[in-house]
């Protein structure tokens, strides 16, 4: 994908606070951009497909997961763990997930993410 298309029409979604830094998430029609700044003038970004976010949200709704869980159940070796972690940061920025600091602190290395459950279906009368 060309840079012009990657960054065209981005809208700010929100922020996810990781273990060492904050990640700003921006949304485009087909993808998300996760940005982490190392200093006021430098940083990096990752592209996360919208489909990956939607799949993670629906498959893990109501569960507590790590990025390794996403890799094991969704990626099947095709997507690096870093992409899975950024997928979870997108869900946090969208307020569809939260980082469980107590579990993450106890694990001492992995971040645990609580994915919100699917909304209850309304029953037609």
Image (tube, rainbow, N blue to C red):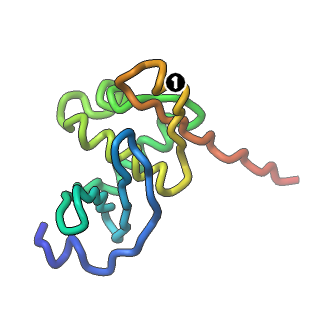
**Which residue corresponds to the image point at 42% horizontal and 41% vertical from the top-left?**
56
**Which residue corresponds to the image point at 62% horizontal and 43% vertical from the top-left?**
118
**Which residue corresponds to the image point at 62% horizontal and 40% vertical from the top-left?**
117
Q: Quadrant of residue 4?
A: bottom left
Residue, disc 1: 103
**Which residue corresponds to the image point at 39% horizontal and 21% vertical from the top-left?**
108
From this view, report whether residue 125 is shown above or below residue 65: below
Residue at the outermost front position: 39
Label 1 residue SS: helix
From this view, report whether residue 34 is shown above or below residue 56: below
Which quadrant, please, contains the N terminus? bottom left
Left or right of 59? Residue 38 is left
Q: Quadrant of residue 46?
A: bottom left
Residue 61 in percent (x, y) is at 55, 37
Residue at the outermost right position: 125
Residue 33 in percent (x, y) is at 29, 62
From this view, report whether residue 84 is shown above or below residue 15: above
Residue 21 in percent (x, y) is at 34, 48
Which of the two residues, 122 or 68, is positioned nearer the viewer here?
A: 68
Residue 65 in percent (x, y) is at 46, 29
């Amino acid at each position: 994908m060309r840079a012009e298309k990657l960054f065209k029409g981005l809208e700010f979604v929100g922020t996810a606070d990781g273990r060492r830094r904050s990640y700003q998430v921006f949304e485009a029609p087909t993808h998300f951009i996760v940005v982490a700044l190392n200093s006021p003038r430098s940083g990096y970004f990752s592209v996360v497909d919208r489909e990956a976010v939607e799949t993670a949200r629906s498959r893990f709704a109501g569960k507590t997961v790590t990025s390794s869980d996403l890799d094991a159940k969704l990626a099947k070796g095709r997507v690096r763990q870093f992409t899975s972690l950024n997928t979870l940061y997108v869900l946090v920025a969208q307020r569809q997930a939260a980082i469980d600091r107590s579990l993450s602190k106890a694990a001492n290395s992995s971040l645990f993410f609580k994915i919100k459950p699917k909304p209850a279906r309304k029953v037609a009368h």
